[in-house]
Amino acid sequence: MSLDDVVSAIRHAERRFERIQGAVDLVAVSKVQPLKRVEAALVAGHRRFGENRVQEAQEKWPLLKQSYEGILLHLIGPLQTNKVKQAVELFDVIETVDREKLARKLADEIAKLSKAPELYIQVNTGEEPQKAGIFPKQADAFIDLCRCDLALPVIGLMCIPPAGEPPSPHFALLRNIAEHNGLSKLSMGMSSDFEEAISLGATSVRVGSAVFGERVAEGP
Ligand SMILES: *Cc1c(COP(=O)(O)O)cnc(C)c1O
């Protein structure tokens, strides 16, 4: 596939599943992709990108942001509390808020820097011990803490379903939690399952290899 193919497939899925045209944003996941592929997407007019490491994003995006206007950068990987300041400075959206310590640190840095990225809470819908994200049964209380106690600008939820399982039940669970907490944004769906995610209410899909080609190397 390519950027154009993925955009067409998203528009097609919106029609097929009776979603509003343009309701679904494409976050083009540019982690570990060669710079020339990323620049080709920028030249083609794409502006919304996802990175999973703060440091890698810092090496790539400040310069690109000087050359191309209107770039929107999403952090989609785990965030360490010692990188929160850098993350708040660089990212427009942080999708991986998943624990109290991180939420408190985000509230501190947002107050200090007077700059607030939009936030998603990551839910570990599969309750996988090695994976980031708040467990579903703790989600309501955590969402409440973030929004009410810390006044964080939480706009939605994000999940990464377990590998090797049908993703649909996880997408449906995420939507459920969002609905009963009054959150309108759902970041779910990757190269292999973004159409399914759109059928279940995704407002944002995170697609890497289908946009840019296979990643040349995974980071450490
Ligand atoms: C890498 C990554 C993606 C994109 O994966 P593809 O299968 O290449 O589309 C999406 N979400 C997260 C959190 C990722 O780390």
Image (cartoon, helix red, strand yellow):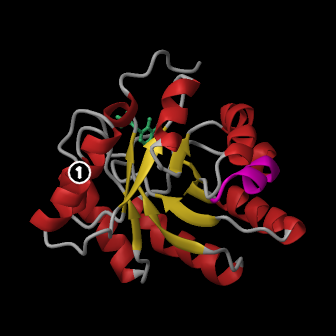
Residue 128 placement (x, y as % from top left): 39, 41
Q: Give yes or no for residue 87 being in the magenta stretch.
A: yes
In the picture shown, does residue 121 fall above or below 195? below
Residue 218 placement (x, y as % from top left): 50, 20
In the picture shown, does residue 180 fall above or below 213? below
Residue 29 placement (x, y as % from top left): 47, 40
Q: What residue would you read off at disc 1?
A: 8
Residue 67 visible in the snapshot = yes
Report the side of 178 relative to 4 (left or right): right
Report the side of 215 relative to 38 (left or right): left
Amino acid type at circle 1 is Ser
**For the residue labelled by badge 1, is the local secondary structure a helix, a strand or a loop?**
helix
Report the side of 19 relative to 97 (left or right): left
Residue at 69 percent across and 80 percent down: it is 151
In the picture shown, does residue 156 fall above or below 167? below
Residue 76 visible in the snapshot = no
At label 1, counting other C-alpha atoms closer than 10 Å, the crowd grade (few under 14, some 14-19, many 20 or more) is: few
Q: As drawn, which residue projects farthest toward the left?
A: 16
The part of the image, by quadrant, that contains residue 154 is bottom right
Residue at 50 percent across and 51 percent down: it is 133
Residue at 36 percent across and 82 percent down: it is 180
Q: In which quarter of the image is the C terminus?
A: top right
Please state the total of marks drawn on the protein image. 1
Please state the extent of the stretch shown in magenta in the rendering: 85-92
Residue 67 placement (x, y as % from top left): 70, 44
Q: Give yes or no for residue 124 being in the magenta stretch.
A: no
In this view, the residue in front, 40 or 128, is: 40
In this view, the residue in front, 140 or 182, is: 182
Q: Main secondary structure of the magenta part?
A: helix
In this view, the residue in front, 162 or 113, is: 113
